Image (spheres, rainbow, N blue to C red):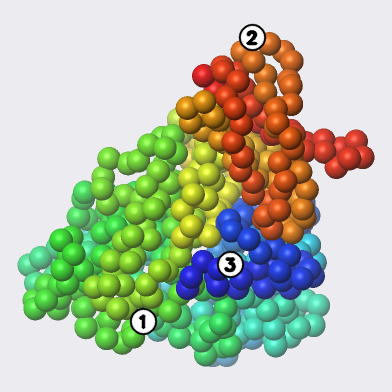
């Protein structure tokens, strides 16, 4: 789907939620997405609504939510009576209350004008998973999900949020229609899907791509059958890194995973003969084409700066994010199983901070700078049409672990706010990104007024403080911001060493200032 068409499709979804003309949000750029399942689903209504309102204030267009199969189907087989009435494709037969957290989120987001995007994913309940060998005890929860049962689960979710389903356990009114979807999460990671590799015919074969092929086939068909065929539907949700191992849990790097999904060798040639049979490449014939709006990817770099790529050529972090559409084009050309020119969405991205995590975090200042630089890198690729912040708020450390240890800080600390709700510098940086790129005698300024409503035309001033000075001085005329998503760019004569900032005012006394960007 070409960029203008995809953005138009998303803008129509946003316009319906925001109750503004569909043309108001049009323009090049990328959607602003938030992911924080902990706040959205597991901390109660008050925490969810507070987080949603803050996300909206910061400029979020969309909130991504994981619909965990095992959670939604909890106790579906418990007791003879429940087991007898249960039909996995029928949402009304699930245990009463299992859908409540999702129903309330969808309703609350609609009221606040934020689009909900549901990633329907495993791991699934025990009865829908394969039986792992005794040697694979740690993989029992993720082992070989039944693809047909997954399709039935997707059908249940999609039916519930079709716009024609009446809530039987809450408001008893019709639930809103969800028009933004993804199928499975990080299938190239052993924490979500196993085995990643499997021995077949005396060979160790990448197996998660084979399973994902079937999961996608049945999940996608379920969306089509329930009236969601024209919705935004993402494929992939791939993790950025991997390893060179070949065990059941060894994560497969995304480029390799994509090639294997399409049965293409590392040299670009298609698998034939025995190698194709080992990978069940014949299943591709059942998928005339992977009908998806965009490929979803999670371009983390861990602690590396966003400009530094991973050592492996098969990794895709934010530093080499443009490799992804090029690879997809190669797959389209080789296999004709994916549309040429498919766009991409970055659906998880963020940096953990120290404080509080001394093991995995970067400094607070680096987090603010890195998320802005990551946004800029993504913006420069016209095939990237969405960027996601993970998380809104830090997750509290693990109870029961010794304080100060790595297991204690196992949870993620990539929020824009700390666990107590105090904003980090990254909160302002997210609301009003700024990146400055020196280019000879010019400094190129790129930014976004993310916090403003989409479609608002305004101006933003640029100011400079010379090195060693405490005084900020305006440079040039205010920049006209006409992009529907609030992006702007401008060149300014380089004043020498010092720092830049952007300043926006509503003309009635309220002013917001970006982070300071130092230049030499």
Q: Which residue is drawn at 45% across and 86% down?
A: 221
Give residue 61's position: percent from left, percent from top. 67, 59
Task: Of the two numbered discs 2 and 3 on the same chain, state the one appearing first in sequence.
Answer: 3
Please identify the residue farthest to the right as the structure is shown: 508
Residue 3 appears in the figure? yes
Q: Give the alpha-carbon distance from disc 1 to disc 3, as whole Å.
A: 22 Å
Q: Which residue is drawn at 74% across and 35% down?
A: 477
Q: Is residue 381 left or right of residue 415?
A: left
Q: Is residue 140 left or right of residue 230?
A: left
Task: Say whether marks 2 and 1 touch (CB < 8 Å).
Answer: no
Q: Give the alpha-carbon distance from disc 2 to disc 1, as whole Å.
A: 60 Å
Q: Which mark is residue 7?
A: 3
Q: Residue 66 carries which label?
A: none
Q: Mark 1 points at which residue?
A: 289
Q: What element carries label 2?
A: loop
Q: What element carries label 1?
A: loop
How many other residues sit within 10 Å of disc 3, few (<14), some (14-19) or many (≥20)?
A: many
Residue 151 appears in the figure? no
Give residue 44's position: percent from left, percent from top. 73, 57
Badge nearest the viewer, 1 or 3: 3
Number of labelled discs? 3
Q: Which residue is drawn at 31% across and 72% down?
A: 332
Q: Is residue 42 left or right of residue 319?
A: right
Which residue is nearer to you in this view: 341 or 35?
341
Q: Is mark 3 on a helix, strand or loop?
A: helix
Is 341 placed above or below 82 here?
A: above
Q: Residue at x 55, y 58 (%)?
A: 386
Q: Quadrant of residue 469?
A: top right
Q: Name the residue under label 2.
A: 468
Give residue 488's position: percent from left, percent from top. 64, 46
Is 414 placed above or below 189 here?
A: above
């Amino acid at each position: 789907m070409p960029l203008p068409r995809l953005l138009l499709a998303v803008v129509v979804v946003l316009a319906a939620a925001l109750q503004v003309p569909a043309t108001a949000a049009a323009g090049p750029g990328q959607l602003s997405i938030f992911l924080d399942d902990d706040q959205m689903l597991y901390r109660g209504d008050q925490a969810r609504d507070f987080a949603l309102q803050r996300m909206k204030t910061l400029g979020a267009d969309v909130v991504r939510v994981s619909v965990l199969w095992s959670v939604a189907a909890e106790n579906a087989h418990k007791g003879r009576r429940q087991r007898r009435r249960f039909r996995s494709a029928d949402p009304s037969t699930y245990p009463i209350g299992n859908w409540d957290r999702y129903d309330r989120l969808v309703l609350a987001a609609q009221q606040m004008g934020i689009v909900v995007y549901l990633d329907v994913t495993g791991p699934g309940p025990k009865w829908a998973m394969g039986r792992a060998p005794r040697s694979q005890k740690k993989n029992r929860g993720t082992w070989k999900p039944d693809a047909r049962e997954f399709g039935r689960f997707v059908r249940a979710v999609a039916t519930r949020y079709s716009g024609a389903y009446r809530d039987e356990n809450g408001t008893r009114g019709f639930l809103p229609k969800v028009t933004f979807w993804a199928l499975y999460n990080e299938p190239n990671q052993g924490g979500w899907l196993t085995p990643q590799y499997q021995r077949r015919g005396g060979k160790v074969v990448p197996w998660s791509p084979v399973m994902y092929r079937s999961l996608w086939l049945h999940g996608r068909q379920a969306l089509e059958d329930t009236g969601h065929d024209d919705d935004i539907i993402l494929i992939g949700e791939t993790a950025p890194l991997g390893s060179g191992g070949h065990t059941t849990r060894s994560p497969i790097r995304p480029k390799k995973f994509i090639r294997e999904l399409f049965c293409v060798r590392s040299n670009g040639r298609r698998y034939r003969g025995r190698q194709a049979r080992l990978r069940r490449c014949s299943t591709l014939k059942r998928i005339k084409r992977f009908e998806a709006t965009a490929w979803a990817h999670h371009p983390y770099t861990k602690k590396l700066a966003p400009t530094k790529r991973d050592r492996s050529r098969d990794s895709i972090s934010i530093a080499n994010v443009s490799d992804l559409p090029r690879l997809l084009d190669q797959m389209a050309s080789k296999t004709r199983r994916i549309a040429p020119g498919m766009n991409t969405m970055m659906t998880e991205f963020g940096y953990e901070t120290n404080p509080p995590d001394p093991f995995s975090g970067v400094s607070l200042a680096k987090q603010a700078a890195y998320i802005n630089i990551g946004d800029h890198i993504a913006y420069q690729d016209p095939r990237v049409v969405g960027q996601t912040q993970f998380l809104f708020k830090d997750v509290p450390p693990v109870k029961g672990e010794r304080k100060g240890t790595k297991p204690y800080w196992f949870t993620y600390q990539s929020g824009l706010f700390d666990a107590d709700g105090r904003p980090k510098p990254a909160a302002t940086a997210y609301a009003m990104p700024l990146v400055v790129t020196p280019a000879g005698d010019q400094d190129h300024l790129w930014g976004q007024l993310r916090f403003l409503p989409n479609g608002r035309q305004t101006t933003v001033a640029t100011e400079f403080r010379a090195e060693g000075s405490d005084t900020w001085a305006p440079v040039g005329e205010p920049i006209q911001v006409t992009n529907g998503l609030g992006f702007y760019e401008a060149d300014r004569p380089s004043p020498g060493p010092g720092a830049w900032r952007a300043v926006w005012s509503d003309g009635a006394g309220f002013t917001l200032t970006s982070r300071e960007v130092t230049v030499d």
